Image: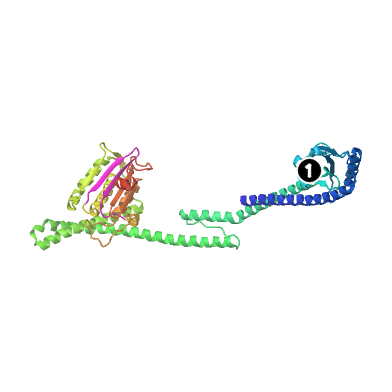
Amino acid sequence: MLVAGVVVVVVSLVLFSQIKDQLLAAKQRAAVDQSLSGVRYAQSEVSGIATGDSASIRSTLDRTVQGLRQRGGAAGDFDVVMVYRSGDQTRPASTRTSLSYRDLPADLRSSVDDGAQAYRYDEVPDAAGRPMPTLLVGAPVPADGRSGDQVEVYFAFPLDQEQQSLEGIRSTVGITSVVLVLFVVGIGVLVTRLVVDPVRRAAGSAQRLAEGHLEERLAVRGEDDLARLATSFNAMAESLQRQITQLEGLSQLQQRFTSDVSHELRTPLTTVQMAAAVLHEARGDFDPPVARSAELLRAELDRFEGLLSDLLEISRYDAGAAVLEAEAQDLGQLVDRVVGGMSALAERHACELRIVVPAGPVIAEVDGRRVERVLRNLVGNAIEHGRGEPVEITLAASGSAAAITVRDHGIGLTSADAQHVFDRFWRADASRVRTIGGSGLGLSISLEDARLHGGWLQVWGQPGQGAQFRLTVPLMAGTELTSSPLPLRPSLLRRAASPS
């Protein structure tokens, strides 16, 4: 509507300008033609003027002016000024007119003095002394036998009628422009009500559908394209609702199956573990192959118990039954316990564990069991993927949050791996032999533990440069995180990548 209004205004101005130019051009042509006719008449009248007789000159000029004013013409009303020039003397006609020779523009008089016909648009006083837009046409009157003497005639054509016509045209164009703008505004409002508003309602319904309101539907009115759009939207919403309901049912069935199987396997597993413990204690009395089998049986049963524990934990999160038991703890001591528990694994992989913690205690309201589980998963993965390079564990705190990073210098992660590293049962290289076992649920459970604290668990990695995981938790349970005291990207790599 704004663009249409600007276009209407511009077109109106251009149209008014063209009408004005055409009116003035027509007036100018008529005035020039009439002045040429008047010059020929004046030439016939002053041809026998007596140059030395002032009375004869004045009477001849007066008679010619009266004759010119009575002739009229197509250009409409006009006034006439005639002068007789002899050297430096200028003798105007004595006939009383509203225009005098002194009122004429100097450049017009100069052009006529040089023997050329000229015209100008100017404002000259009318009979009441008010400035009036006027077309002035001046020309010398040719005459033979007058050496150094010259008769000049000037025609003044008032433009009051043209001005009135232009005022009427301006009003008409202005009213037409306003009507057109209002018409465009009306069309815009009508289009908005008929098209844009239904589209906005459809967009709002789609937004509410995306937010989980699966019962959202559009009202179908009429049989036009918008009605077909509403019908298609409703059909899509019904299909999505049906499929999502089915998926929710399948998900609940899967969760219940996982939880039931995990609980049901607990009892036979406990019995088998007891028998395996007896065999493991008595393995010294067995032959070496049997003793080795007892050891393998004990190790695999422990691994199986860990898998069941992970399945039970993830089923608790799926069911929304996980509870945070937060209490104030020193995160520095917690990191020391985790590193102490993982030192044997680090020695087997010839990996050095480096700890960077603040000098003072870092107290945070956390569930110590869950945070320790997160750190064990992160440190264990870092040792396994670190290729014997040192693993760095860093603790830092700010006024509202605490963060722990675990950095390895191993095989690293691609951007695609980083997007899936927290998915359940996902592994970057399924063919690689894992040295510490695992269910593939460790990082998924760690992510849920971090979210249960209202915190973040994030990862950075580059192929060949290693990876870094960052756990950020609020110092006070229930507060919202806004930043982390440790960067996710390792500082050494940031300095190396920055321009010198």
What color scheme is it?
rainbow
Residue 380 placed where, x, y %?
24, 51
Q: Nearer the viewer, residue 398 or 166?
A: 166
Q: Residue at x 54, y 62 (%)?
A: 231
User: Is residue 393 on the magenta stretch?
Assistant: yes
Q: Quick check: is 233 in the magenta stretch?
A: no
Left or right, 201 with reference to 430: right
Which residues, given as a range, are shown in magenta? 389-413
Asked if one can make out residue 275 in the rendered structure from this viewpoint, the answer is no
Where is residue 316? Give x, y as percent. Answer: 32, 53
Q: Residue at x 27, y 59 (%)?
A: 264
* Viewer-closest of 82 and 343: 82
Expressed as whole percent of the image width and height from the top left, the position of residue 240 reads 46, 61
- Answer few, some or many: residues within 10 Å of disc 1's Cα (few below 14, many 20 plus, some between 14 and 19): some
Q: Secondary structure at mark 1?
A: helix
Residue that carries the numbered disc 1 in the rendered image: 113
Whether residue 57 is visible: yes
Left or right position of 351 against 474: left
- Mark 1 is on which residue type? Asp
Quadrant showing the C terminus: top left
Q: Relative to 474, is 84 on the left or the right?
A: right
Q: Nearer the viewer, residue 479 or 163?
A: 163
Which image quadrant is residue 368 in? top left
